[in-house]
Amino acid sequence: MGISQFVLASASPARKRLLQTIGIDPIVAPSDFDESLVQSRDPVLLVQVLAQRKAERITPKFESALVMGCDSVLAVNGQIHGKPANHAEAIARWQEMRGTVGDLLTGHVLFDTAKKRMLVKCQVTKVHFANPSDEEIRKYVATGEPLGCAGAFALEGKGSVFVEKIDGCHSNVIGLSLPLLRLMLLEFGYQVSDFW
């Protein structure tokens, strides 16, 4: 195969767990890229550029590796949302998005550092939100879970009770589309099983 290292340019425990689920035990190398440097009203462009910048910060550290960068946002009613800054923002966001359908977008970038190749993709999953009461929202936000998540919810956590259904890739909502990763690896000539 020629590549022995798979590097995740993210501190997200959820992304690491997703990779481990399919047999990839990544080297975790979080990027220190300042996300505020990238601004765009186009959510697809935004997540792709952010994912690319994160991965680019890490690639010089690895001579022969596949480096994966990801970034997720939730687009609801024409507004783009990343992680909420505080409890008040998370509550206000939930009050706005309850009963609506949002697009969870994740930018995926894969660098083959040995061959100096890069792929940039975006996966979009529609999320249908329930209509929780103000009390339910306050109690959910008080758990702290929404503060670490794009869109202020974790599908793999307590937030799942407020998601009625999703249209599209389930793992994308958690932070990394596993089916898309498989296709990206194939495009580079690798298989997921090469990392087992």
Image (tube, helix red, strand yellow):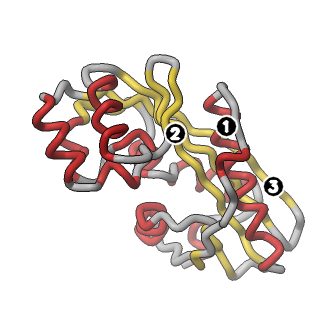
What residue is pinned by disc 1? 46
Residue 129 left/right relative to 101: left
- The percent position of residue 132, horizontal first and vertical second, equals 16, 30
Q: CA distance from mark 3 to mark 1?
A: 17 Å
8 lies above or below 91: below
Q: Report the front residue among 88 and 137.
A: 88
- Residue type marked 3: Met
Q: Report the front residue among 15 and 136.
A: 136
What residue is pinned by disc 2? 73
What residue is pinned by disc 3? 118
Residue found at x 69% / y 82%: 4
Q: CA distance from mark 2 to mark 3?
A: 22 Å
- The percent position of residue 171, horizontal first and vertical second, equals 42, 49
144 lies above or below 7: above
What element does badge 1 sit on? Answer: helix
Residue found at x 66% / y 46%: 36
29 lies above or below 109: below
- Residue type marked 1: Leu
The mark that comes first in sequence, 3 or 1, is: 1
Q: Quadrant of the C terminus?
A: bottom right
The mark that comes first in sequence, 2 or 1, is: 1
Q: Residues within 10 Å of mark 2 (few under 14, many from 20)?
A: many
Q: Report the front residue among 169 and 190.
A: 169
Which one is closest to the eye, mark 3 or mark 1? Answer: 1
Residue 112 left/right relative to 39: right
Which one is closest to the eye, mark 2 or mark 3? Answer: 2
Residue found at x 63% / y 39%: 122
- Residue type marked 2: Val
